[in-house]
């Protein structure tokens, strides 16, 4: 009975009170660090079920979205070599997985709205077995 009463009390609290971790502030900003990491992106998850004429464009968009989420920048620039690799087998035969290097860099353009941008480049690998996200020192 006491457990049920506690559950009812918890349900009547605002969601932000339930979900808060206790600490506020002191959050690291994406602007603070210039960093480079290597990721394996499973493209097949994003293009599966897409019509053939939309597969390569959707793969490009999913890589951009992946870079935005993981690096915290809205400005994402893709290397032409990566773009050529995605389109090499045509619009409908996109690789299932791809290894990319995401580099968060400072924007040298003074008129730019963003302080940082993400540069996405291709990393050739022989096999994807056992690969994990790695931090790269440049």
Image: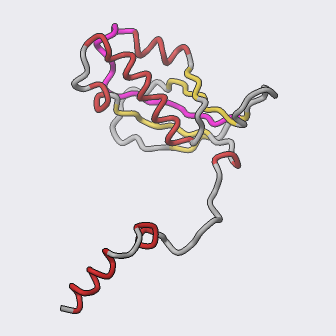
Q: Residue at x 72, y 32 (%)?
A: 113
Q: Residue at x 51, y 35 (%)?
A: 67
Image quadrant in which you'd find residue 103: top right
Q: Residue furthest right?
A: 110
Image quadrant in which you'd find residue 94: top left
Q: Is residue 119 left or right of residue 3?
A: right
Quarter of the image that includes the N terminus: bottom left
Give the magenta range. 88-105
Image spot of residue 36 (x, y percent): 61, 39
Residue 20, compared with residue 117, is above or below; it is below
Q: Residue at x 25, y 87 (%)?
A: 5
Front residue (pair 89, 65): 65
Q: Is residue 37 left or right of residue 104?
A: left
Image spot of residue 75 (x, y percent): 61, 30
Residue 106, compared with residue 23, is above or below; it is above
User: Is residue 97 covered in magenta?
Assistant: yes
Front residue (pair 135, 65): 65
User: Is residue 132 covered in magenta?
Assistant: no
């Amino acid at each position: 009975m006491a457990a049920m009463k506690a559950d009812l009390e918890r349900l009547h609290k605002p969601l932000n009170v339930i979900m808060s971790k206790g600490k506020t502030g002191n959050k690291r900003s994406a602007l603070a660090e210039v960093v480079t990491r290597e990721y394996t992106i499973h493209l097949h998850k994003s293009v599966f079920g897409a019509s053939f004429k939309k597969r390569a464009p959707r793969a490009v968009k999913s890589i951009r979205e992946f870079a935005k989420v993981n690096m915290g920048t809205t400005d994402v620039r893709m290397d032409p070599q990566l773009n050529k690799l995605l389109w090499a087998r045509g619009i409908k035969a996109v690789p299932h997985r791809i290894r990319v290097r995401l580099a968060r860099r400072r924007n040298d353009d003074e008129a730019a709205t963003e302080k940082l941008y993400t540069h996405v480049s291709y990393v050739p690998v022989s096999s994807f077995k056992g690969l994990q996200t790695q931090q790269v020192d440049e």
